[in-house]
Amino acid sequence: MRVTVIGTGHVGLITCVSLAELGHVVVGTDSDEEKIGQLDKGLSPFYEPGVEELLVSGMRAGKLSFTSDSTAAVAEADVVFICVGTPPRASGEASLVAVEQAAAVVGRHASRRTVVVEKSTVPAGTAQRVKQMLVRLKPDLAHEVVSNPEFLREGKAIEDSLNPDRILVGAESPSAFAVMRELYAPLIGNGCRLIETDIATAELAKHACNAFLALKISYANALARLCERSGADVVAVAEVMGADDRIGKQFLAAGLGYGGYCFPKDLVAFERLASGLGYKFRLLKEVARINDEAVEATAEKVRDALWNLENKKVTLLGLSFKPGTDDVRFSPALALARRLMSQGAVVVGYDPEAGAEAKAELPGLEVASDPYEAAGGADCLVLCSEWAEFRDLDLAKLDEIMQHPVIVDGRNFFEPEQMRAAGFSYYPTGRPAIY
Ligand code: UDX
């Protein structure tokens, strides 16, 4: 099928390379010419394992190309994916300006009937708006509108996109469902579950999934606060909970909390949507509050260990919002850095991939090029995101180069016994500290 993808960000680019890999002829379009120039050279604008390999192989096979001319790109497409950003407005509501612009391009320039797929996470009701616009611009073409939310995780996006646990399609007509079945035929043929619903259900389900995962994390973090006060161990509590299949063991890891460009903004957008529909979804506000509290609780541990923060050097290991990505948007590590810096600490960070991004986001942060450079002379080290390479840290060397051997573990990454044996004062999250 001929597929056009509008927007080549995290969602759009993964959609491009995955659909080309499934055999479709894909054109990716973006208003950012610099980004298009980079993609044309086979370079991804962001770090995501496996994406550049698929980019290059798709382009070599003649299945994948990029252009900044969206008008030409939509003209002959069978399917157009809208993958543009939906950034939060000051109120927390999702801004749908870019979605409207993308829909207008299709409405004005598609020369034949096409299926318009919203892939960006949007509030329920958006597809209806897109449909109205398409009808108004060219009533005779009767384009179809479909909601097909993505569930991919950064750092595992290619894996999630080519081996998804489910494909969700919300549509109105049998012909639209048929097009989407054909589009994903190789994945469905491999046994992937296809869930077909009406459009509003698909739109709402995406927000419901993200909000529920965020809720699980905040539940674990609230338990961590309770464990810290009672002497219990939140890792063991989570293990007990996870042994119950009805609860499930994933997303119960207490720590610095969630970040990234999905959970924080989707949660607020979902709460705003509910409020707009006349329902006060207070639970979601509490989830966000507990998440903020997780950063403060970690800062409190640093203060507990160091007393006054003025002129103390604090090292942060891991600056991206989670391992496996260079994305620092809504990163809890940077929220912690801001808090510690505002209280007088000198904060030096290290991240295997996100150093430059972190520096751009927070210029006052010093960024080192390896963990030992970051930790030299530090009064305290905080593990903020659990990159696998931190498993190989030479603890004896850290002990030697740090001013004081104090580790605050914002992800319960280390084993307490390992820390005790290495002679560190160790402050994990929701577990007894070792002094
Ligand atoms: C998420 C969803 O998982 C994905 O389905 C959706 O499409 C987009 O949003 P992503 O933002 O890439 O994906 O990150 P994810 O791996 O889900 O982690 C989100 C955040 O939660 C990270 O900051 C992570 O460190 C944190 N987290 C995760 C916890 O604090 N505890 C956990 O138990 C799990």
Image (cartoon, rainbow, N blue to C red):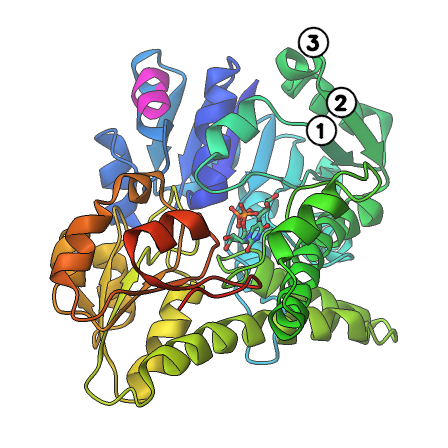
Marks 3 and 2, Cα distance to the nearest angstrom?
10 Å
Residue labelled with disc 2: 193
Q: Main secondary structure of the magenta part?
A: helix
**Which percent across, then down, holds residue 67?**
34, 37
Q: Is residue 153 above or below residue 177?
A: below
Residue stretch rendered in magenta on the structure: 53-58
In the rendered view, does 115 fall on the left or right side of 152? right
Tell me where residue 399 appears, x and y as whole percent: 19, 58
Quadrant of res 63: top left
Task: Say which amino acid is labelled 1.
Answer: Arg
**Picture layout, residue 263 above or below residue 241:** below
Quadrant where the C terminus is found in the figure: bottom left
Visible in this render: residue 356?
yes
Determine which residue is flagged by label 1.
Answer: 166
Mark 3 touches mark 2? (CB < 8 Å): no
* Residue located beneath label 3 in the image: 189
- Spatial CA distance of label 3 from label 1 is 13 Å
Asked if disc 2 and disc 1 are in contact, CB closer than 8 Å, the reply is yes
Task: Give the structural element (helix, strand or loop) at label 2.
Answer: strand
Residue type at mark 2: give it.
Arg
